[in-house]
Amino acid sequence: MKRISLLVLLLLLALPDRSQEAEVEKVPAVEGGAFFFEVTSQYLSFGQRDLNGSMVLGNAEQVFYIPRVMPSVGFGVGFGRRYRSGLWAISYLVSSHNVTFQDRNGTGVSRLLQINSRTYLLKTPPLKVFAHFGLNFPWLKVENNAANKSGKIFDATYMGVGVNAGAGLLLPVSSRMSFSGSVIYRLNAYLYAQGPGAGIDVTDLFDDRNGPRHRLYLRAPVLALELSLSYAI
């Protein structure tokens, strides 16, 4: 009887441990980890809306020769977090471009801070189809693209805000690594220009320096192809 009572006592002591193990097993594991880092390569093609290479904006103190930006390839880094319904990410993207303005050739650098979400529309293992939406904060620096009232040449920087929309595919490579490709349409609005003097609102400048006040921001549609490799932590 003493042995039976001892066995029953041991079984009773073991029951809480088994219930705890069962609870642990019920907690769903996040595939590859919730947070991730990613590296991105991109191909950018700027539309010729206002960045047409012929527009001139200025005032009595400075003038900007609005460039036409040629397509180019760039790269970026970012981080984000996965969810069951998709993911979000913050990326910093850089690309170098040839530009033309006033029948002159030059170079420029496009930089972009992009905040985007990728919402899964279709999950067909192993592929996932997603919609891409987000915001971006672009700034474009062009060499020798502005001048002061004395005619001295300066670099010009254009800054603004934009929105993103697109779609893509995500393919897991391993439990932690995944590859994604996105086609993205961006509508960038360059609101401020900086050249010889302090930054100025584009709508405070004048067409051809002596013409009517320029009433709109600089509209710059951009078509981008992004290929990203991410690693979950």
Image (cartoon, rainbow, N blue to C red):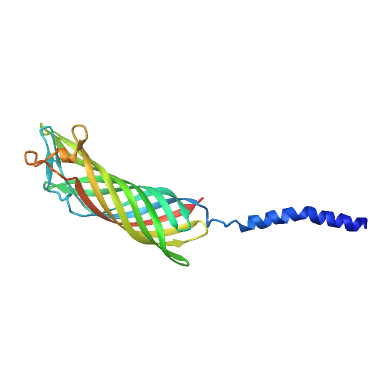
- In the displayed orientation, state which residue is furthest to the left: 210
Left or right of residue 216: residue 110: right
Residue 79: x, y in percent?
Answer: 43, 48
Count of numbered badges drawn on the protein: 0
Left or right of residue 17: residue 86: left
Q: Tell me the quarter of the image containing the N terminus.
A: bottom right
- In the displayed orientation, state which residue is furthest to the right: 1
Q: Nearer the viewer, residue 103 or 227?
A: 227
Q: Is residue 47 above or below residue 159?
A: below
Residue 141: x, y in percent?
Answer: 24, 42
Residue 178: x, y in percent?
Answer: 46, 58
Left or right of residue 84: residue 73: left
- In the displayed orientation, state which residue is furthest to the bottom: 124
Residue 194: x, y in percent?
Answer: 21, 37
Left or right of residue 22: residue 65: left
Seen at 20% across and 49% down, the residue is 219
